[in-house]
Image (cartoon, rainbow, N blue to C red):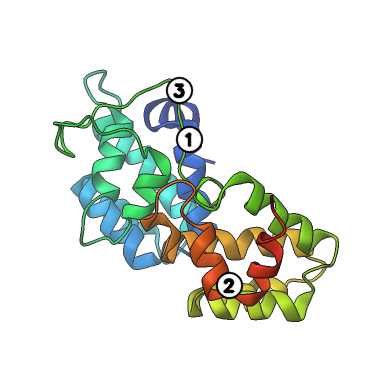
Amino acid sequence: MCERNEEIKGSIGAENYTMLIDEIMNGNLTEQKVKSIGLLMHPQVHGVFVAKHLKLDLADVMCSMMDKWWTVKLFSEEVNGEAELFKILSNAELGLQYLADRMRPDAREPDSSPIDVQFKKEPKQLKDEKSVLGKECYAKLLDSAKNGDIDDHLMLLLATGLHPSVKGEYIKKSSVKNIDAEHVMRAILAKWYTVFLHTLKAGEGREPLIINNSVSAIVCCTIV
């Protein structure tokens, strides 16, 4: 846990903070990307990465970086931490626009630039794999995994048909001892979001899901 945990969450948003750490834990944020994020935050934040990346787990390195970011920038009442984080993650060279969109999809005002982005505190509508696929389709996939309609063989076929990275995520998650099928399904859908679904609008994910995979077609076509 970060030393300035509550202050950091208050600045960048608790859900955004959790998503950032989860991306590291899930392997979607590599060491190189964390280093690049540090460089965009502040030279002293990058210095923390250099000093600690060989000593700590990557998630703990990010926490230390966040602590430093707080002391050199986020502490100021004039700084909008959420806007700063959005701006960093939207940097084209990082390739993390999907994560920026997932954190604050409706944040940008029509005539504003990423630097001047204003964040709407309420209501907050996240774009994620659930919203892009549609709640019913997403729930049906999870239920089908949970009750065994989609078994290990079918889930592998599903993951293979979606994207090579999704197949890799299935292989990684399914190898974990005692992991339940619903959790694996959540993981592969989340991975599909990072490599494809983030490019779509809410509700648009069901059609490519059905077109690209006979397993999901059978499942999703049962939804009225």
Q: Nearer the viewer, mark 1 or mark 3?
A: 3
Q: Nearer the viewer, mark 3 or mark 2?
A: 3
Q: Report helix, strand or loop for mark 1.
A: loop
The reply to whether dot 1 and dot 3 touch (C-beta < 8 Å) is no
Name the one closer to the observer, 217 or 39.
217
Q: Which amino acid lies under the numbered mark 2 shown in the image of this protein?
A: Glu
- Res 84 visible: yes
- Residue at the spot 64% in from the left edge and 52% down from the top edge: 138
Q: Nearer the viewer, residue 22 or 59?
A: 22
Residue 150: give x, y in percent of width and height: 77, 70
Could you tell me the amino acid type at mark 3?
Pro
Determine which residue is flagged by label 2: 169
- Residue 57 visible to an observer of this rendering: no
Q: Residue at x 25, y 49 (%)?
A: 90
Task: Name which residue lies at 64% across and 53% down.
Answer: 137
Sequence-wise, which precedes: disc 1 or disc 3? 1
Q: Secondary structure at mark 2?
A: helix
Q: Which residue is mark 1?
A: 3
Q: CA distance from mark 3 to mark 2?
A: 32 Å
Distance from the alpha carbon under mark 1 to that under mark 3: 29 Å
Instruction: Choose between 5 and 23: the one closer to the eye.
Output: 23
Please tell me which of labels 3 and 2 falls first in the chain: 3
- Residue 123 got which mark? 3
